[in-house]
Image: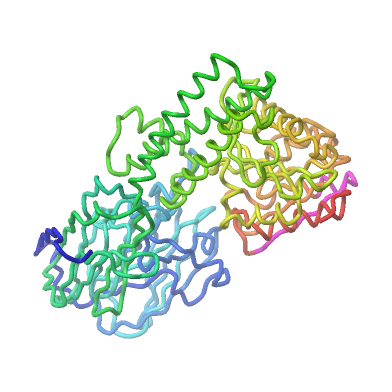
């Protein structure tokens, strides 16, 4: 598909022409020394320069320092330093992170103070989550430079793409970089792509821009193409081995060839500087699956309406309500996914967009590929459910079905539809009893958090060790009505799966889910055989341990990162000390270099090992 392309190349020259030959860019991840090991200090951030950045955990707490060593090939009189960073103020009242920056050069130390404010994200999703912070750095001489960046507030937590050392006349704005969702920055300029999202509907493809800005290098080579999953060129977008750049050049790519593509996973690939460097952006073509989803959504709506009038065939009242909730959830998921994906190109009514954004509030970093997989799985699951209902195979259309299921129930406490993911191991039918794991997501997740974590790592453990896993969205949280919802959900699953072992119900959760795990155990003593609280245990307050005696017969594992700046490790230590004082079975594991995240397979394996040690559960 390399012929008959319609390519409009628009060159906008002379914008922000630098005329500077003494611009220096330093990648944030290429540090000299940091408080954490390289594995933890470096974060993969596709919108960052080169796709990587310094992890915020490396400068998460007061006093932590990261340092850099550079060699200036020429002096920079009246220099300034410009940091490109990302930081999310995830709770009300958060203040900008404060840092001290020391610059050592030619026997002189320059001390600077910088504030890093809220950029509305951690730099994971798009260029719009990155901002700039700058300060005057004084005269810098030719030769070695050492830079020390130290946290000077309670927390730091900035994801650092890198920094510039430039003359004070040099102009760079956060706005010009925010539109670029892939970028590579050099001493002599940058090149970037402004594709907004990886989902592309063939008939609605509006093109994209390649943006090049020079800081001194006037001649660039560019070769842009669309390639398939094997790296084979499918469409040639643009090729120029002698592109003259004066300031900023913007090349607009448009082609009707995209309309001929079959659904699938592709990549926009841009090679520049004679093939020495490359930018890539996922390009998932979704027109066919979206059309199918629209048709199935309408079909399922009609089926629900018909069954509401007659009652589900061979279903008792409780099963009728359960299956109805599942079908309603399938319709909602299809409907909102369609709007969400099309919203990335500005389609859809405003009210529909708001509903979809709310539905996926905790999943905005999902890739187009994962959305497509979700659509396929939901359609496949719902088709089988309806087929079973129509054929009267079983009074309950999930009998004999294993693996990962997307389901929902109506809360008795609130009346709301509560989605959840349910995993049934293949060994369910063969075993006399099957343990149950209730997995509670954190404040930034939804029902998909554990099943989708690390490419299904947690589900693989559930299959290997033969556990049922329930992962609720928990729209009401984990206290009050939220806790009642968890109990209702457990009873729903235990009733539907009589081989589920009521004496081996476990619960684990991370962050907000860790607090929720603790709360469920103390509010409903005897319900759980064991708990694992990760990055969260007991909330602060004078009556924090008011019901801790209810854990007397519930073994409690506490996992926490020593570098956690969101929920300080001190809370985990206080809880462990109280459990020790009471003589209750517990274990505290602190990981000095870990932050707030859940470390999929590692944490789940530790959890099951603990339960095996202290309950009748066997792996």
Q: Which residue is at the far front?
A: 391
Residue 169 visible in the picture: no
Q: Residue at x 48, y 38 (%)?
A: 92
Query: On screen, 551 above or below 280?
Result: above
Between residues 68 and 308, which one lies in front from this camera angle?
A: 308
* 215 left or right of 571 in image: left
- Going 30% across and 63% down the picture, which residue do you hit? 268
The N terminus, quarter of image: bottom left
Q: Is residue 302 left or right of residue 221?
A: right
Position of the C terminus, as image quadrant, is: bottom right
Residue drawn at x 14%, y 64% is: 249
Is residue 605 inside the magenta stretch? no
- The image shows residue 560 at horizontal and vertical percentages of 68, 54
**Above-or-below relation of 503 to 417:** below
Residue 425 in the image, given as x and y percentages of width and height:
71, 48
Q: Position of residue 474 (x, y in %)?
A: 60, 34
Q: Is residue 498 left or right of residue 539?
A: right
Q: Quadrant of residue 114?
A: bottom left
Residue 247 seen:
yes
Residue closest to the eye, 453 or 26: 453
Q: Is residue 465 above or below residue 414?
A: below
Which residues fall within the magenta stretch?
Answer: 577-592
Whole-percent x, y for residue 478 in the image:
65, 33
């Amino acid at each position: 598909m390399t012929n008959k392309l319609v390519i409009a190349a628009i060159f906008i020259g002379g914008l922000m022409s630098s005329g500077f030959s003494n611009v220096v860019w330093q990648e944030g991840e290429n540090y000299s020394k940091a408080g954490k090991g390289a594995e933890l200090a470096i974060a993969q951030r596709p919108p960052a320069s080169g796709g990587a950045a310094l992890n915020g955990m490396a400068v998460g707490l007061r006093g932590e320092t990261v340092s850099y060593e550079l060699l200036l090939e020429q002096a920079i009189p009246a220099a300034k330093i410009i940091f490109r960073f990302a930081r999310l103020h995830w709770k009300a009242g958060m203040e900008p992170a404060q840092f001290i920056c020391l610059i050592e050069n030619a026997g002189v130390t320059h001390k600077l103070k910088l504030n890093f404010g809220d950029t509305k994200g951690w730099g994971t999703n798009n260029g719009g989550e990155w901002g700039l912070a700058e300060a005057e750095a004084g005269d810098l001489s030719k030769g070695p430079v050492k830079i020390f960046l130290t946290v000077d507030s309670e927390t730091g937590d900035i994801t650092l793409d890198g920094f510039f050392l430039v003359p004070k006349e040099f102009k760079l704005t956060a706005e010009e970089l925010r539109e670029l969702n892939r970028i590579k920055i050099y001493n002599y300029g940058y090149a970037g792509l402004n594709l907004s999202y990886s989902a592309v509907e063939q008939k609605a493809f509006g093109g994209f821009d390649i943006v090049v800005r020079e800081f001194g290098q006037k001649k660039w080579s560019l070769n842009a193409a669309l390639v398939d999953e094997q790296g084979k060129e499918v469409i040639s977008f643009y090729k120029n081995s002698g592109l003259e750049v004066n300031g900023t050049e913007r090349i607009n790519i448009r082609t009707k060839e995209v309309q001929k593509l079959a659904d699938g996973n592709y990549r926009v690939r841009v090679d520049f500087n004679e093939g020495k460097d490359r930018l890539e952006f996922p390009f998932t073509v979704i027109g066919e699956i979206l059309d199918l989803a629209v048709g199935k959504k309408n079909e399922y709506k009609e089926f629900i309406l018909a069954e509401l009038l007659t009652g589900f065939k061979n279903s008792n009242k409780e099963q009728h309500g359960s299956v109805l909730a599942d079908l309603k959830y399938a319709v909602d998921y299809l409907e909102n996914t369609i709007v969400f994906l099309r919203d990335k190109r500005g389609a859809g009514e405003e009210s529909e967009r708001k509903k979809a954004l709310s539905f996926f509030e905790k999943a905005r970093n999902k890739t187009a590929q994962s959305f497509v997989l979700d659509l396929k799985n939901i359609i496949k699951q719902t088709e089988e459910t309806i087929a079973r209902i129509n054929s009267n195979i079983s009074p309950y259309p999930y009998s004999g079905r294993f693996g990962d299921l997307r389901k929902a129930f109506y809360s008795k406490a609130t009346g709301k539809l509560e989605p959840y993911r349910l995993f049934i191991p293949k060994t369910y039918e063969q075993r006399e009893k099957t343990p149950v794991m209730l997995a509670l997501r954190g404040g930034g997740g939804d029902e998909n958090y554990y099943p989708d974590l690390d490419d299904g790592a947690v589900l693989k453990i559930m299959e290997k060790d033969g556990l049922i896993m329930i992962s609720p969205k928990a729209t009401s949280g984990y206290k009050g009505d939220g806790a009642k919802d968890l109990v209702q959900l457990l009873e729903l699953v235990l009733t539907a799966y009589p081989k589920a072992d009521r004496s081996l119900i476990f619960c684990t959760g991370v962050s907000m889910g860790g607090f929720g795990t603790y709360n469920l155990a103390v509010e409903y003593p005897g319900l759980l055989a064991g708990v694992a609280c990760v990055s969260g245990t007991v909330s602060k307050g004078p009556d924090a341990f008011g019901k801790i005696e209810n854990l007397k017969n519930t073994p409690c594992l506490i996992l926490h990162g020593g570098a956690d700046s969101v929920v300080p490790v001190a809370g985990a230590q206080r809880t462990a000390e109280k459990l020790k004082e009471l003589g209750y079975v517990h274990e505290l594991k602190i990981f000095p270099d870990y932050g707030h995240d859940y470390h999929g397979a590692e944490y789940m394996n530790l959890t099951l090992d603990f339960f095996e040690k202290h309950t009748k559960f066997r792996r």
